[in-house]
Image (tube, grey):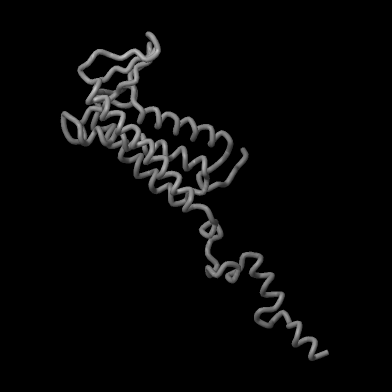
């Protein structure tokens, strides 16, 4: 009987069934992390952050290239009709916010764009949701696109005018960065209505 007890092990013996149960319940030996918060050990954050910055880089690059082409080929030229009278490409310089609002507050909108970028980067540290990664990536890429204009275009640093060129009939002229920001914002609203948080948790009111 004593021999059998030594083979099976008692609850106080290291490596026995009692210790394995504690590890399965999330104890310090569950993953070798010394009892850290399980949320910090959740896999997938790195991939979500990669998606966020990939989407942001794509949105930024497309916006930047489109503006370079517009300035080189379309600015100071007659508008180009794309869909009859319903959609034109018409290059303008916009000192205000998206869609031409608030032209007198260029510096304020520049600071807001910079603040949005910092908030998104900080939020990325606890990002575990793929849809949120796409939404934040669109916001980040769009904000960077317009902020680049604010910094590097005339009339001066932080007062630069944004290049807009998409002109639907009866609507304000805008650019691809504005489109990315709006699409990201709409996606965030939809995710919030569904109760999905950036950390991947789902809550129901």
Residue found farthest to the right: 1
**In percent of the image, x 66 and y 66: which residue is there?**
24
User: Image quadrant for the N terminus?
Assistant: bottom right
Q: Quadrant of residue 106?
A: top left
* Residue 33 x/y as whole percent: 53, 68
Residue found farthest to the top: 85
Q: Quadrant of residue 52?
A: top left
* Residue 49 x/y as whole percent: 44, 49
User: Image quadrant for the C terminus?
Assistant: top right
* Residue 166 x/y as whole percent: 34, 20
Image: 200 above or below 174: below
Residue 20 or 51: which is nearer the viewer? 51
Image: 57 above or below 170: below
**In percent of the image, x 18 and y 36: which residue is there?**
157
**In percent of the image, x 40 and y 36: which residue is there?**
139
Q: How many marks?
A: 0
Residue 169 or 72: which is nearer the viewer? 72
* Residue 187 x/y as whole percent: 49, 33
**In percent of the image, x 73 and y 83: which residue is there?**
9
Q: Viewed as shown, does residue 176 lie left or right of 39?
A: left
Residue found farthest to the left: 155
């Amino acid at each position: 009987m004593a021999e059998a007890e030594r083979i099976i092990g008692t609850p106080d013996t290291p490596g026995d069934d009692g210790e394995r149960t504690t590890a399965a319940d999330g104890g310090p030996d569950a993953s070798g992390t010394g009892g850290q918060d399980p949320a910090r050990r959740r896999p997938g954050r790195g991939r979500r952050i990669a998606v966020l910055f990939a989407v942001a880089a794509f949105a930024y690059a497309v916006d930047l290239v489109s503006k370079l082409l517009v300035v080189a080929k379309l600015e100071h030229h007659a508008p180009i009709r794309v869909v009859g009278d319903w959609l034109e490409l018409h290059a303008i310089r916009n000192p205000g916010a998206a869609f031409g609002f608030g032209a007198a507050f260029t510096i304020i909108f520049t600071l807001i764009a910079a603040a949005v970028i910092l908030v998104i980067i900080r939020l990325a540290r606890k990002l575990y949701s793929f849809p949120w990664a796409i939404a934040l990536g669109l916001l980040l890429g769009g904000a960077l696109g317009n902020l680049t204009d604010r910094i590097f275009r005339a009339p001066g640093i932080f007062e630069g005018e944004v290049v807009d060129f998409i002109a639907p009939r009866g609507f304000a002229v805008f650019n691809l960065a504005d489109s990315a920001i709006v699409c990201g914002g709409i996606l965030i609203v939809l995710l919030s209505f569904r109760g999905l948080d950036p950390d991947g948790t789902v809550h129901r009111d």
